[in-house]
Image: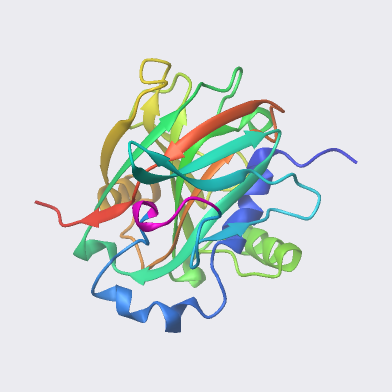
Amino acid sequence: MRRPTATAAITLLSCALVFAGAADAQSELRAAPLVPPFSAATPGVPPAPWQTVKINERKKLTEYRIVHNSNVGVLHALADGSASALGVPVSFDVNAAPVLAWRWRVAGLIEDADNSVAQKEDSPARIMLEFDGDKSKLSFSDRTASRIASSLSGRELPYATLMYIWSNTAPVGTVIPNPHAKRIQMVVASSGAGGVGSWQALKRNVRDDFKRAFKEEPGLLKSVGVMTDTDNTGTRVEAWYGDLQFLPDR
């Protein structure tokens, strides 16, 4: 059988990032949009509520570990022909704190990766944000895709997924539709080899990017994840992630 493309895998991954029971456990986050910081964790396996999220049982997992960088805890990701995410459930309205701030660093780009092409759709670093919404507004094809994905993964597909990616060549700010799933849109946050090997401190207005990508207001944010993947290109890449914070729009 033909190996699933990275893009198809991400479609299923989007189902898995919404954890069962998250709404009750994270209801307090509606007023305080906090993402558990990597800097507070001790070196080793990322602590709960962070969870490794499999795409499927056949897919090799990306390795995620907390390491120290200048005596500060950060998340290290190692992908070697692999794809899995590290995700955490949340539940809050991004309008209250629409600016996502984070740091990331990559050891190198993925040769021949192209996020607009299904067979080449890998990225050394991603931030993944999943949103709730009124699914009755979706087209017949989108509803059908959601049902199929739900049956395959055992979890409900989110209404919409916004990703921030590191692209080989696309300019920062470019919106790249997922080649297989219209309900997944990618925004280029870093681009090219210029920043490779150095920490980049970034900020993006999630509310504005969501409106630009999906042509509507964002619903409730249900999960936050990071992902380093090379399952489609079969290559090896390393990335590091600092804390993710949602800040007011000032």
Camera-nearest residue between 105 and 146 = 105
Q: Quadrant of residue 212?
A: top left
Q: Horizontally, is 230 left or right of 178 in the view?
A: right
Q: Which residues are magenta?
A: 38-44
Q: Is residue 112 above or below residue 94?
A: above
Q: Is residue 38 above or below residue 231?
A: below
Q: Residue at x 52, y 53 (%)?
A: 183
In magenta stretch: residue 229 = no
Furthest residue in direction left, as rendered:
250
> How far across and down, in percent of the image, does residue 190 sit?
37, 29
Q: Quadrant of residue 97?
A: bottom left
The image shows a total of numbered marks equal to 0
Q: Quadrant of residue 24?
A: bottom left
In magenta stretch: residue 39 = yes
Q: Residue at x 48, y 21 (%)?
A: 168
Q: Is residue 178 visible?
A: no
Camera-nearest residue between 203 and 34 = 34
Quadrant including the N terminus:
top right
> How far across and down, in percent of the image, does residue 60 sit?
74, 44
Q: Is residue 102 above or below residue 123?
A: below
